[in-house]
Image (cartoon, rainbow, N blue to C red):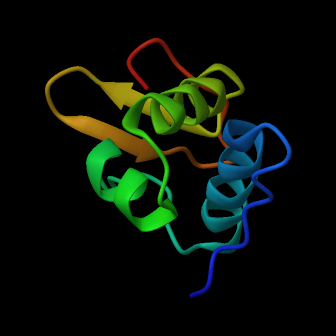
Amino acid sequence: MDIQIDRRRSVWPQVARIIRERVEGGTYPAGEAIPSTVALATEFDVSTSTMRKALVSLIEDGTLWAEPGMGTYARDSEKPPTQSG
């Protein structure tokens, strides 16, 4: 898949939008771990700090949830977020 990022605009929101689309479209199934921050940063050709910012925004909006030491997971859009993910 060819990822189109407009480098003239802020990159992290664009990355977040693509990952959100992947979750909503089932590329990253609900409850399943998404690729690591480093793997995603490599795939998107962005820094790990840019990728972390995108992932944090998706965790904050409920698209993803993180389990410390275990990974980041796609959240089921039909279920509300819980404290444990």
Vertical arrangement, residue 26 with respect to residue 84, above or below: below
Vertical arrangement, residue 33 with respect to residue 52, above or below: below
| Furthest residue toward top | 83
75 or 52: nearer the viewer: 52
Q: Is residue 24 visible?
A: yes
Q: Is residue 78 visible?
A: no
Image quadrant where one finds the C terminus:
top left
| Furthest residue toward right | 9
Residue 63 screen position, x and y as percent: 64, 40
- Look at 53% across and 34% down and name the residue there: 50
Residue 47 screen position, x and y as percent: 43, 41
The image quadrant of residue 81 is: top right
Left or right of 7 in this view: 30: left
Vertical arrangement, residue 38 with respect to residue 22, above or below: above
Left or right of 51 in this view: 26: right
53 or 29: nearer the viewer: 53
| Furthest residue toward bottom | 1
Left or right of 12 in this view: 56: left
- Look at 64% across and 19% down and name the residue there: 60
